[in-house]
Image (cartoon, rainbow, N blue to C red):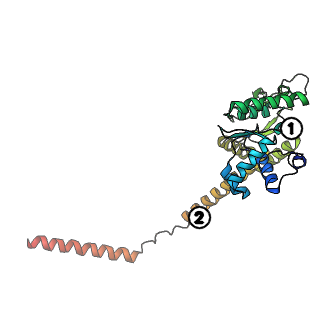
Amino acid sequence: MAEARLVLSNLMQGSRVRNYLPDQKLIVYHMWATSPSEAGCYEPDIAGWSGHLSITSVALIEALNDFETKGLIAQDKETGEMFIMDWFRCHKFDTAIRQKLFDKSIKKIQSKKLLDLVLEKKYQIDAKYGVNPIKSTTYSPKESKVSKAKACTHAEDIPACVQVDEFENKGQSHRKQSEIICGVKCWVTEDVIQTKKMVNEYGSENVEIAVKRLIKKGFEPLPSKVEKELGLVIRENVLRENNEKKFHKSADNTKPKKPIKPRDIGLMEASKQKMQEAVAVRQAGL
């Protein structure tokens, strides 16, 4: 159901509506503005209208019957549906999309009498204003052309390091090729300057490491992304170097064993001799 509907600007000025009471005019406006059908033919929700408009169901039914006698609507008592007679004065189905919505709506009409009336009214309005639903077509996006690509000298080491070939469009200027520097794809002069600056400052090895990491993550190695990844590579290298220095420093600070003094050696020999004598006395007693 649509959230809003077009309503005739002179709806309340017509000879069939201007003499109605305010409540009746409100019902006329409500049935226009809240129509759930693109064709203006639907079964009114009397209970819902009663709650929205604060008008009793009996008064609503009487108002609709009066509208039918004045030619504002047509009703089918068997299906409970109604059709707004002037609907096609402001609803034009002059494009393929709108025509599709209209076709979907008329398929929901149960009353054969109202269906014939809807189609007749639409034909009259189309003939009067020269509307031709066939003249417009639905939007179809253009297909993008696939470009040819050739690998550069870095392709064996870096899979995504390719140069985009020129587009083969007749009558159009060819697209500029990309330049590859240490695996970084450069399209404009600023990209080349930025990439060369990274190579001079951090070295080509670190730049290529950052490129390979980006490709592994599924990103294209553009200068801005490579520079961001390069910062992570340099930070990891610094942390690794700091950890290695701490390890070697702790190993160098190991305390050496104290040398054995001659006095301690004499005590050890005397103790050893006493133990041997005690063992000999024990064996002799046995």
Percent position of residue 225, x then y: 75, 47
Percent position of residue 37, x then y: 73, 40
* Residue annotated with mark 2: 249
Disc 2, SS: helix
Picture disc at residue 256 = none
Q: Is residue 205 above or below residue 53?
A: above
Q: Quadrant of the C terminus?
A: bottom left
Label located before the other in sequence (1 or 2): 1
> CA separation, marks 1 and 2?
92 Å
**Label 2 sits on what residue type?**
Lys
Which residue is rendered at x = 23% and y = 73% of the image? 275
The answer to whether one can see residue 229 in this image is no
Percent position of residue 210, x then y: 70, 46
> Is 115 placed left or right of 246 in the picture?
right
Residue closest to the eye, 128 or 207: 128
**Label 1 sits on what residue type?**
Arg
Q: Is residue 63 above or below residue 149?
A: below
To which quarter of the image does residue 131 belong? top right
Which residue is rendered at x = 67% and y = 57% of the image? 238
Badge 1: residue crowd in 10 Å (few <14, some 14–19, many ≥20): some
Residue closest to the eye, 112 or 242: 112
Q: Residue furthest top?
A: 170
Residue closest to the eye, 123 or 184: 123
Q: Residue furthest left?
A: 286
To which quarter of the image does residue 179 belong? top right
Nearest to the eye among marks 1 and 2: give it: 1
* Residue annotated with mark 1: 89
Percent position of residue 213, x then y: 67, 44
Which residue is rendered at x = 90% and y = 29% of the image? 128
The answer to whether one can see residue 253 in this image is yes
Disc 1, SS: helix
